Image (cartoon, grey):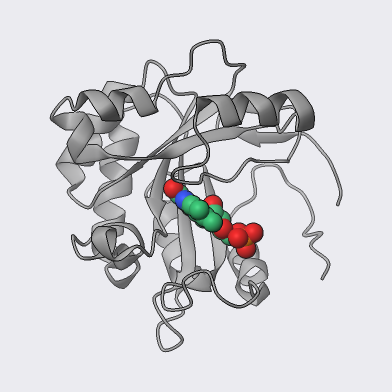
Amino acid sequence: MYIHTLKIGNIELENNILLAPMAGITDLPFRIICKKYSNPGLVCTEMVSSKALYFSDEKTKKLLNTDGEERPIAFQIFGSDPDIMGEAAKLISKDADIIDINMGCPAPKVVKNGDGSKLLLSPNLIEKIVKKVVENTNKPVTVKIRKGWNNQNINAVEIAKVIENAGASAITIHGRTREEYYSRACRFRNYKKCKRKCKDSNNRKWRYKK
Ligand SMILES: Cc1cc2nc3c(=O)[nH]c(=O)nc-3n(C[C@H](O)[C@H](O)[C@H](O)COP(=O)(O)O)c2cc1C
């Protein structure tokens, strides 16, 4: 792997190793241990519900505790109501270095509310959500997607363009569809296409090798 610095919005990362957000795993102690032993350029919280933040749920607030942690840290939020996502962004803006929006979670309890990867079927709603979050924070906004909902709906390239035009500073792609959940190996063909279609503010050549 080619290690280099990375810029996301106005945030300079020491390196391009990013700790993937993982619900139930990337809590405060886990992030501190990863930072100490692997020094990723960016760590991310577990995903938190924008609705829970909006309604001041105490347990949810604790998931965003960063006491004693090195910076930068991305806070990941999920939800499908643009106004509530905007309000949640406002609430976490002071403490987050980057706000990441989860549009890739495949869990039934998330998808049944229209959140996470279900959004991949609604590009117009994606645009509204990203715009609202960008409008309500002065921090860079990033979005995590999957390559599509299922094999009949592989639309990462289209969605990446929508997200870029709505003002996001970076996009992460999980190379499986929602239907694939966590099975099979990730397929990378779409990453290359997205990279070609979107502007790369770091101005780097595509270096992914299988
Ligand atoms: C237990 C677990 C929890 C995860 N939770 C999240 C999450 O909260 N937000 C998110 O964007 N991705 C989440 N992911 C997806 C990972 O960040 C990553 O994109 C995915 O596992 C693909 O990498 P892999 O092929 O190495 O597993 C989770 C993955 C696992 C295994």
Please state if 8 lies on the left or on the right of 124 as rendered.
Answer: right
Residue 13 location, x and y as percent?
69, 29
Say whether residue 68 is visible.
yes
Residue 209 location, x and y as percent?
83, 66
Please state if 36 lies on the left or on the right of 9 as rendered.
Answer: right
Q: Is residue 82 above or below residue 191?
A: above
- Quarter of the image for residue 185 reads bottom right
User: Which residue reaches farthest left?
Assistant: 55
Q: Is residue 144 above or below residue 202?
A: below
Q: Tell me the quadrant of the picture where the C terminus can be found.
A: bottom right
Q: Is residue 116 above or below residue 170?
A: below
Residue 115 location, x and y as percent?
26, 57
Residue at the spot 58% in from the left edge and 46% down from the top edge: 20
- Quarter of the image for residue 6 reads top right
- Quarter of the image for residue 99 reads top left
User: Which residue reaches farthest right?
Assistant: 2
Residue at the spot 25% in from the left edge and 31% down from the top edge: 88
Q: Is residue 129 above or below residue 71?
A: below
- Choose between 185 and 166: the one closer to the eye: 185
Please state if 146 lies on the left or on the right of 207 as rendered.
Answer: left
